[in-house]
Image: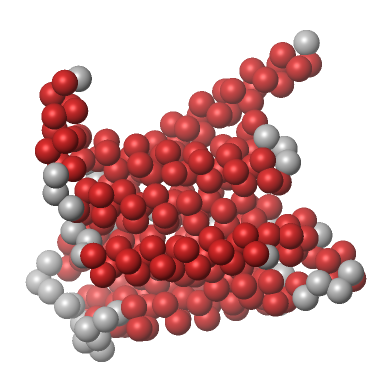
């Protein structure tokens, strides 16, 4: 135990560990807040779909030799998020089918472009890094950290200010429209925010694991709580704890950061599910 604390103290003497913790916690917090809304709106897998769109955009940015791929990845991801959330329920191709089609298509096109226009000699390494995350979360610069802080703060402020409207659109969009709420506007807002979160999270867990940050804290909180506000708060706290614990474990055990965070979330979901069963059993008795 003492050796473990000494190892952590050594790592914390380097700036990359605090940077990774700050960015990881902020991304997990933002993901958990929107995750509850997406789960309740039956759009849980939009994270996977949009992350694969971002993967395809990264491939296109590499083909165009863009020095900053964020200039392409962010607007393209936002565009497809709006397309899915605003038209998915009314189009001939419904939301779940649209997400699946977009996810598979973007992933295939992105991999094809990476093969046709490789940006480095290590293609398999580039693909694996983009899909499953990399050590880039441990090599963040101060500029990247501040960018994550500013964008995360904007997401949190938007969520707090429009909490009541998001709540109304989440539970009964038709009734919200009937009472004068501009449901389409708030669906647009949700789409933009989730796209920003996904692009930020790609360096942390990779495109294939982003849905875990969105889904697991929300589902875990729903095992033991029923109110919307309670689930939101529990999900946020759980996401922060799992992200911090996952990053620390990955440093100590030398495991992939993204996969470790997801593993901690899976363990938390198991514990909350067990706790929910015990609580309901006692209540029934």
Residue sticking out furthest to the bottom: 64
Task: Decide if residue 92 is in sight here.
Answer: no
Q: How is the image coloured?
A: secondary structure
Position of 180 with respect to 136 (left or right) is right
Side of 183 relative to 241 (left or right): right
* Residue at screen point 34% across, 56% down: 23
Residue at the image point whose x is 58% and y is 71% from the top: 191
Residue pictured at 74% horizontal, 64% vertical = 165
Query: Would you place residue 128 above or below residue 61 in this image?
Result: above
The location of residue 162, given as percent across then percent down, is 67, 65
Q: How many labels sit on residues? A: 0
- Check the picture and name the quadrant holding the C terminus: top right
Give the farthest residue toward the left.
121
Tell me the quarter of the image containing the N terminus: top left
Left or right for 77, reference 19 = right
State the residue at coordinates (18%, 35%).
Answer: 8
Q: Is residue 209 above or below residue 200?
A: above
User: Is residue 256 something one can see in this rendering?
Assistant: yes
**Farthest residue toward the top?**
285
Q: Position of residue 111 (x, y in %)?
A: 30, 71
Q: Position of residue 117 (x, y in %)?
A: 21, 82
Q: State which quadrant residue 244 falls in.
A: top left
Q: Nearer the viewer, residue 220 or 5?
A: 5
Q: Position of residue 180 (x, y in %)?
A: 86, 74
């Amino acid at each position: 135990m003492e050796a473990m604390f000494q190892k952590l103290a050594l790592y914390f003497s380097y700036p990359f560990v605090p940077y990774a913790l700050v960015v990881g916690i902020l991304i997990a917090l933002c993901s958990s807040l929107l995750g509850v809304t997406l789960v309740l709106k039956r759009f849980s897998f939009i994270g996977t779909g949009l992350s694969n769109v971002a993967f395809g955009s990264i491939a296109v940015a590499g083909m165009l030799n863009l020095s900053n791929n964020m200039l392409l990845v962010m607007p393209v991801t936002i565009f497809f998020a709006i397309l899915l959330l605003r038209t998915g329920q009314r189009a001939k191709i419904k939301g779940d089918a649209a997400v699946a089609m977009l996810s598979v298509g973007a992933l295939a096109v992105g991999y094809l472009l990476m093969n046709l226009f490789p940006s480095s000699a290590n293609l398999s390494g580039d693909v694996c890094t983009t899909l499953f995350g990399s050590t880039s979360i441990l090599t963040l610069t101060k500029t990247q950290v501040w960018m994550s802080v500013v964008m995360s703060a904007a997401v949190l402020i938007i969520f707090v200010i429009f909490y009541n409207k998001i709540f109304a659109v989440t539970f009964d969009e038709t009734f919200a429209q009937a009472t004068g709420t501009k449901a389409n506007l708030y669906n647009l807002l949700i789409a933009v925010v989730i796209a920003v979160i996904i692009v930020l999270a790609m360096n942390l867990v990779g495109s294939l694991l982003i849905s875990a940050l969105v889904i697991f804290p929300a589902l875990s909180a729903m095992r033991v709580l029923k109110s919307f506000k309670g689930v939101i708060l529990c999900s946020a706290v759980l996401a922060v704890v799992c992200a911090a614990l996952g990053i620390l474990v990955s440093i100590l055990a030398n495991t992939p950061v993204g996969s470790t965070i997801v593993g901690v979330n899976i363990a938390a979901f198991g514990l909350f599910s067990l706790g929910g069963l015990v609580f309901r059993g006692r209540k029934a008795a």
